[in-house]
Image (cartoon, grey):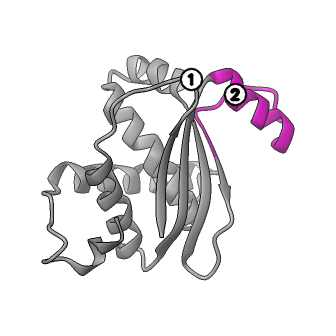
Amino acid sequence: MAISFNFVNSLFYIPKKKTCEWLILVCYLEHAEIETLDYVFCSDEYILNLNSRYLNHKFYTDILTFDYSENHRITAEIYISVDRIKDNASKFKNTFQQELKRVMIHGLLHTLGYKDKSVVLKRLMRKKEDDCLLLFDNMKHVSRETAPIYNKC
């Protein structure tokens, strides 16, 4: 099991241990397990190139999720545009960190089977994101000795 945070032309703070524990906990609550989860934080231009090359979309996006998961075993590459996160944080009157967590969990939720192609599905996805953000905010560090599911961080 591996969770990685990769930075392409950008660098900012992520509370790695807590974020890792949070992602594992969300998967655990959804009856899934992380095999390999790679987050890549990049620029608008980087993600535009991927969006064009792999999806034939000629527009910027905040996130691209390449999901290779099978049988509740999560394997994915999640690309996040730091430029979009900054702009959206300002637009939606959020902090950078809050918008970042929302987009990170949005990508993970896609690997867990959540969709957002209709108004109803978008509403369900947003509710799940809100629940996951609340979970993060209420998490206290759990020691490896007292919580076996965290031994994978």
For the record, the magenta segment spans: 44-64
Q: Which residue is at 68% across, 66% downward?
A: 68
Relative height, residue 6 to residue 61 (above, below): below
User: Crowding near pointer 2: few (<14 within 10 Å), some, many (20+)?
Assistant: some
Q: Nearer the viewer, mark 1 or mark 2?
A: 1
Q: Position of residue 23 (x, y in %)?
A: 38, 60
Image quadrant holding the C terminus, namely bottom left
Residue contact at pointers 1 and 2, CB within 8 angstroms: yes
Residue that label 1 marks: 9
Query: Which of the two residues, 59 or 49, is positioned nearer the viewer here?
Result: 49
Classify mark 2: helix, strand or loop. helix
- For label 1, the SS is loop
Position of 65 with respect to 7 (left or right) is: right
Sooner in the amino-acid sequence: mark 1 or mark 2: 1
**Residue neighbourhood size for the residue with mark 1, other residues' Cα within 10 Å, grouped as few (<14), some (14–19), many (≥20):** few
Q: Where in the figure is residue 54, as x and y percent of width and height?
A: 83, 44
In this image, 3 relative to 135: left or right? right
Q: In the rendering, which numbered label is found on residue 46?
A: 2
At 13% across and 77% down in the image, what residue appears? Answer: 146
Quarter of the image holding residue 115? bottom right
Whether residue 86 is in magenta: the answer is no
Which residue type does callout 2 highlight?
Answer: Tyr
Which amino acid, by three-letter code, is at mark 1?
A: Asn
Residue 116 at x, y percent in the picture: 59, 52
